[in-house]
Amino acid sequence: MSIEKFSVEKVLSVQRWTNTLFSFTMTRPAHFKFTAGQFARIGLKVGDELVVRAYSVVSSPFDEILEFFSIVVPEGAFTSNLQHLEIGDELYLEKTAYGFLTLTRYQLPLPQDLWLLATGTGLAPFISMLQDFDTWSKYKNINLVYSVRTASELAYLQRIQEIAESFGEGHTGFKFVPIITRDPLAVLHDRLPVLIENGELEKAVDLEFNPATTHVMLCGNPQMVDDTKAALKARGLTMNRRGEGNIAVENYW
Ligand code: NAP
């Protein structure tokens, strides 16, 4: 991997949510352009080797800094080192952003109902999209659905509220739906495909999946993406290709 493809950036802050979940911010070089929903490739020197991983950007394309949300993968070469990040540390950032999980991909149906379905750190691209006024002006209804194992893993709650109050000011169609799958007492605790099949997700937001009005994005656990895709297809939604169709996805590992 050619090191010239990267710029060297500095860590500006680290926030720890749980023992295995953390977020960090770093400097953003002027050349690094991205669309909300895209991912960056970040490199870390492990010994003499540059280890690189993909990370969706949490921050908005209008921010001066870059923010990322990470899980510590047990014995993972990258994250087990990354978790010890400190302010001032150096990280490598590939100069180009990647990925097609962006709202610009949708042409038909026209924007009306946006469903953002995430598990775990798959929340990241959706936080970025929601920090863009364009998203709020395009869509009448926006449902952000965030599935985690335990309540302690629900990161970014305050930020979501702040975003809804600032970017979403005056918008009446925003709903945030947490799902806590390992807490039987949680209001919603089944996995996403089950909640789609039994209609509980639609009931929770008082809106139905409709092939003529729905844009739905899935991001997170690859098995969740596959299973949820199947559940949505069973409801008549189609994959988005060349601008047409309802479903767009990003696997996280
Ligand atoms: P996770 O297993 O992805 O669970 C997060 C949420 O997704 C939970 O609510 C979980 O429900 C749900 N879920 C899992 N499989 C599903 C499916 N087939 N359909 C619908 N929902 C599903 O947990 P995580 O803590 O975010 O990540 C777990 C592991 O994934 C980590 O320990 C790590 O090894 C790996 N990971 C790797 C990377 C990477 O970049 N290599 C990134 C993120 C995660 P349940 O409680 O019912 O399982």
Image (spheres, helix red, strand yellow):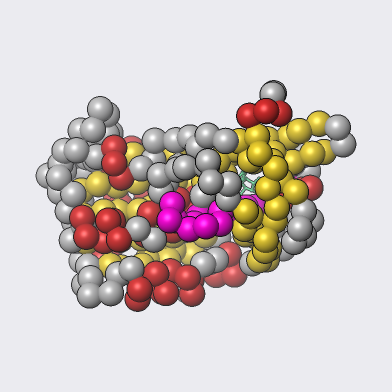
Q: Is residue 228 visible?
A: no
| Left or right: where 163 falls relative to 21 | left
- Farthest left residue in view: 212
Percent position of residue 10, x then y: 70, 53
Q: At 39% across and 35% down in the image, what residue appears?
A: 100
Report which quarter residue 88 is drawn in: bottom right
Q: At 42% across and 74% down in the image, what residue appears?
A: 162
Q: Total number of numbered labels? A: 0
| Left or right: where 232 falls relative to 3 | left
Q: Which residues are magenta?
A: 58-74
- Give yes or no for residue 60 being in the magenta stretch: yes
Q: At 27% across and 34% down in the image, what residue appears?
A: 240
Q: At 73% across and 34% down in the image, what residue appears?
A: 51
Q: Is residue 116 visible?
A: yes
Vertical placement of residue 165 versus 222, above or below: below
Percent position of residue 79, x then y: 72, 47
Percent position of residue 32, x then y: 52, 42
| Left or right: where 243 falls relative to 81 | left
User: Which image quarter is the C terminus in?
Assistant: top right
Q: Nearer the viewer, residue 237 or 77?
A: 77
